[in-house]
Image: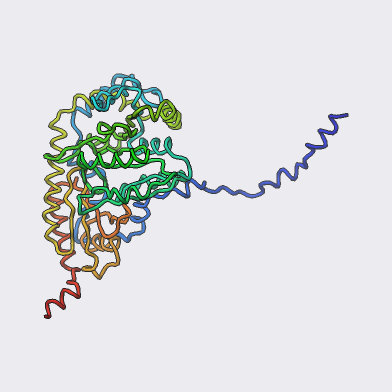
Amino acid sequence: GSFGLVRTHVNVDPAKLKSLRQRWSVKPSEMSKKTLNPIRAIVDGMKLTPNPEKPMIALSIGDPTVFGNLPTDDTVLQAMKEAIDSHKYNGYAPSVGYQKSREVVADFYSCPEAPLDGKDVILTSGCSQAIELAISVLCNPGDNILVPRPGFSLYKTLAVSMGIQVKHYNLLPEKSWEIDLQHLESLIDDKTACLIVNNPSNPCGSVFSREHLHKILSVASRNCIPILADEIYGDMVFPGCDFQPLAPLSSDVPILSCGGLAKRWLVPGWRMGWILIHDRNDIFGTAIREGLVKLSQRILGPCTVVQGALESILNDTPPEFYQGTISFLKSNSEICYSELSTVPGLNPVMPSGAMYIMVGIEMEHFPDFQNDVEFTERLVTEQSVFCLPATAFEYPNFFRIVVTVPEEMMIEACIRIREFCARHYRPRSQDSHELDQ
């Protein structure tokens, strides 16, 4: 009866089933194809053959450990050894981190204007995962985010792979890389889900004043846009300059502040970062927190051993360690700035923190090169000095120098850059006309 009818409906020819896939076809996903690291794309395309006569000096990688001249403090290593020897940290932690470790971070960053407790902290696998979670929880495909230009390329890499549009707001080199606030505000529309503020800045090494941060907050406030504050270089600022975290200044703008151990503690490979949830007026409410918890469950939390060591790393590292790093970075930046500011055709912008200095190239004086990529490529070929062309940060005709190299290498690199520029510099044609008259 009725069973017979059903059987005739599902009576699919077995040969047909097989024909759905007769040959192998395994293709990479759309997401993987949309994931592009602009730095890799540019660097891989450069013809980097150093001059065999000169040892290579790489001023390109934002890793302070590369040359071994900036080791982390013994306290930090001791904390890790003790965490391992305790045998307590070999299992899974909650995906957002151990409660105790979250509380330690909360205590370290809490202040009266922006109090934090354990539930306001999500521990992540490095600051880059913190940034990824923050973008993921605030944005849907089709939304847009506002990111600095020049700026760290990872924001764009992450956003584009998630189907989120990136809008670049300009930083002004003549104002020590402050944000062009009018330009920033002109980019906001009803699809803007988040404003990323990176301070202190990679690649600029700039540090915003309290007044400037207040102005940024008022743009966000007027337009009801939450902020992702990338503060991985927080407190890595030169003496006489003051780092002001964004959250304590905010009365109504909710902020996800991203940080980690990588830079200040000089252990980027340990992959320990965090998101500090600074809710204002309960705008994030429970929903954003729950979203972050769920997203953190895609990766089961950051390294438990580092979490076990966190309390001692944050509370026992001597202030002299931080001061030593900072005074080294300042001294190297000053050497680099004073050497390069007297090179015709170059315009370095003095940094106030982080580990970088940006140098403008007056391209019209270097007719041998089309652009910053060609300029830096030939600098490797002729002088074995590798700087990142700022096209990698969406900012042509500049290059970025990492100032963590040992001092004598920094000096040698500057001498070579000077020699390179002297060789290729040409006075502008209108200058020569003036000379003729």
Q: Give x and y (percent) for residue 399.
A: 25, 56
Q: Say above or below: 312 vs 27.
A: above
* x, y percent for residue 55: 20, 56
> Residue visible at 74% across and 45% down?
16
The residue nearer to you, when weighing 403 against 178, is: 178
Residue 376 vs residue 229, the one in the foreground: 229
Q: In the rendering, at what x and y percent does residue 384 appear?
A: 22, 58
> Relative to the observer, which residue lies in front, 359 or 430?
430
**Horizontal placement of 315 versus 87: left or right?**
left
In which quadrant of the rendered image does the C terminus lie?
A: bottom left
Furthest-bottom residue in this view? 437
Residue 258 appears in the picture as rendered: yes
- Farthest front residue? 222
Percent from the top left, x then y, of residue 201?
Answer: 25, 44
Examine the image and state in which quarter residue 86 appears. Answer: top left
Residue 101 lies, with reference to residue 433, above or below; the image says above
Name the one closer to the observer, 222 or 382.
Answer: 222
Q: Is residue 309 visible?
A: no
Specify the quadrant of the image occupied by residue 318: top left
